[in-house]
Image (cartoon, rainbow, N blue to C red):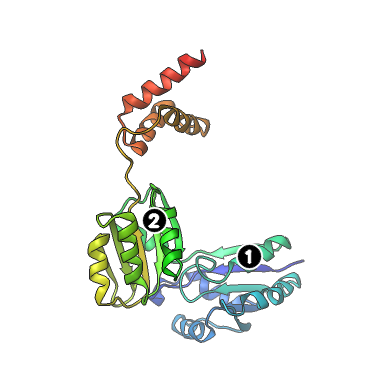
Amino acid sequence: MTGTLVLAGTPLGDPSDAPPRLGEELAAADVVAAEDTRRLRRLAQELGARLPGRLVSYFEGNEAARTPELVRELAGGARVVLVTDAGMPSVSDPGYRLVAAAVERGIRITAVPGPSAVLTALALSGLPVDRFCFEGFVPRKQGERTARLREVAEERRTLVFFESTHRVRATLEAMAEVFGADRPAAVCRELTKTYEEVRRGPLGELAAWAADGVRGEITVVVRGAEAAAGTADPGELVRRVAVREDAGEPRKAAIAAVARECGVPKRTVFDAVVSAKHAQG
């Protein structure tokens, strides 16, 4: 029988946020793969957790080379626990490559759910949370960064980004230029730590605030693009309603949802749907 790969969430800052199962899984593991082994040892000590299994490093620099070794351990029946410095493995952290390799081999994968900077920042931002997308880190080079931001400039969902201390100013300035200086956003830094701070405001103001430097782990949340009122094509309105109806949503609710999405009156959407039905009949 093959072993099990356990993706274990770790605290963003406060050790007491660690899920109770984390200590149990660390103690039961044959192998623990950690992004920073020294950091994991400190966390285990704070949690009073044992680390009897083999401890190996697994970070961006050795992820490709170490993945086959861990897959062999899993294929031989080992229980491998994967942890990163903070949050859930694979979310802009090492892990995806190992998960994909384990899936390909038919190896069982489970998780110890834990803190997530993406969801924590989203909840604290004060921006819409019903629909969102995670964009990770934007490119370092200016031209590539601007191109990536332009790709999502018209995205209606709330956007969540990670950024480093040294690049947050440049990124906020680029966002203000591409998305508009008035687009609402929030910069969340040092989540759950002693100096946690959530700064909310238009992107232009946040870029000016960041000019003097921002320290710590940074997550940026940006409101999605607003729909231009009254500009939706009737055919597009009908298509959106049909997609929702095909998914099981009642027509009345689908019409109301599409009206909100497109910034048009519900009557406009209703008339478009009725006209399309008559044209078909």
Circle nearer the viewer, 1 or 2: 2
Secondary structure, mark 1, is helix
Q: Quadrant of residue 26?
A: bottom right
Q: Amino acid at mark 2?
A: Leu
In the picture, measured across the screen, residue 111 lies left or right of residue 108, that is left
The residue drawn where x is 41% and y is 27% is 234
| Residue annotated with mark 1 | 99
The label shown at residue 151 is none
Q: Position of residue 155 (x, y in %)?
A: 40, 49
Q: Position of residue 245 (x, y in %)?
A: 48, 30
Secondary structure, mark 2, is strand
The residue drawn where x is 23% and y is 68% is 208
The residue drawn where x is 52% and y is 72% is 22
Q: Nearer the viewer, residue 85 or 154?
A: 154
Q: Earlier in the sequence, mark 1 or mark 2?
A: 1
The residue drawn where x is 43% and y is 65% is 143
CB atoms at circles 1 and 2 under 8 Å apart? Answer: no
Q: Nearer the viewer, residue 126 or 64?
A: 64
| Residue annotated with mark 2 | 159
The answer, for residue 83, to whether it is visible in the render is yes
Q: What is the crowding at mark 1: few (fewer than 14 residues within 10 Å), some, or many (at least 20)?
A: many
Q: Quadrant of residue 174?
A: bottom left
> Vertically, is 185 above or below 7?
above
Q: Quadrant of residue 171?
A: bottom left
Q: Amino acid at mark 1?
A: Val
> Vertically, is 157 above or below 55?
above
Q: Quadrant of the N terminus?
A: bottom right
Q: Position of residue 97 (x, y in %)?
A: 63, 67
